[in-house]
Amino acid sequence: MATLSHGSKLVVDLALPKTVSHVHAAAAAVAAAAGLTLRNTPTTRCESDFVGYLSTTEASDAYAKHKVKQYVIQQKSWTSMFDPKVLLILLVRSSAIHFLPVMEQYAKDVDKLGETDDGVEEYDVFPPIPDLKPASRKTVLSMVRDLVVMTTRRVLERLSEIYLPRRWTWKLMKNIQDSAVRKYHRGVLGLALCTKMVQTSLVGHAITVLSEFTVAESIILGKLLSDRNENKKAWKTARRDMFFTTLRCSFSLCGAGLGAGIGSAIKPGIGTFLGLNGGDIAASIFVLSMYKRWNEAQHNEQ
């Protein structure tokens, strides 16, 4: 009864306005006071509550704007592989892969000749200079193949942007040097920077290694299918080449990741670039030397 009398008093006080909206407001006040719910009765908000609601929404929008990471993908043009810097890197890489084993073998021949001179350090007879034409031809062919690899990489980048989530595509196409510099400026140093850059390089360099693997395997299959005299020996050679190609690409990715991590710990940016390419080249040379020794062992057994 006390609640109803209090509600009747509110009706008398709030029924004075002549407009319909005020009448609805009075009815809502009566319902609130009596603890009742009236159907089709509009409710009103306090102005301070409305302002507080807006401020909360703006704060959440600002929070989301600063916390949600924007994945900006920078696509490279199809002609970016003809940049002088890129061509110079390809030339140095191909030359190192094909000329260093030749020079290493020549150095071994010189050492053997020195051992046969009864301890005399100075001698006039040197082993003949190896023929560099095969290595030069392989270097040129390797550069052409690297250009095809880079074109294949552009194709894979376009496909990843279409079929993969944006976050994955951004990680695959990330600039590893810039990433090392950004981490350094954020205060990541020493072993932590090395560890993070190894992870970043393994992902960021994967699409390059995948492109090289695709081209190398395609060349092996093309040679096998174009050979008219297909026999068991040809298939065995193709399987062996595919195995060593897979091994070389795996070692190349691991070497590039380790090199980038060590180089970033020493000097982010330049050290990252040198470590990435140096590790890639060193791993490729190591696998190629293993392949050469394995071939020599097979020929000796035969």
Image (tube, rainbow, N blue to C red):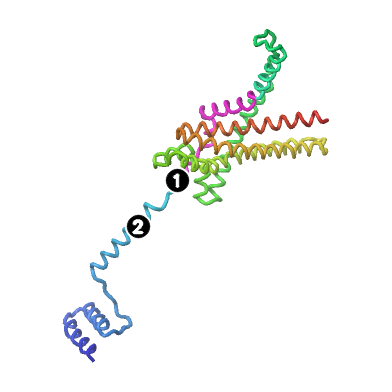
Magenta-drawn segment = 71-100
Q: Is residue 68 visible?
A: yes
Q: What's the magenta bit mostly, secondary-structure-wise?
A: helix
Q: Residues within 10 Å of mark 2 (few under 14, many from 20)?
A: few
State the residue position of label 1. Answer: 72
Q: Which mark is residue 209?
A: none
State the residue position of label 2. Answer: 61
In the image, residue 184 lies in the stretch drawn in magenta: no
Residue type, mark 2 in image: Asp
Q: Nearer the viewer, residue 19 or 140?
A: 140
In the image, residue 89 lies in the stretch drawn in magenta: yes
Q: Nearer the viewer, residue 210 or 195?
A: 195
**Horizontal arrangement in the rendering, residue 71 relative to residue 244 (left or right):** left
Q: Secondary structure at mark 2?
A: helix
Label located before the other in sequence (1 or 2): 2
Write down the quadrant of residue 190 in the picture: top left
Write down the quadrant of residue 46 in the picture: bottom left
- In the depicted structure, whether residue 233 falls above or below residue 129: below
The residue shown at (48%, 32%) is 271
Q: Secondary structure at mark 1?
A: loop
Q: Is residue 130 visible?
A: no
> In the rendered image, which quarter contains the C terminus?
top right
**Horizontal arrangement in the rendering, residue 252 relative to residue 236 (left or right):** left
The residue shown at (54%, 49%) is 162
Q: Position of residue 64 (x, y in %)?
A: 38, 55
Rounded to the nearest angstrom, the CA distance separating label 1 from label 2 is 20 Å
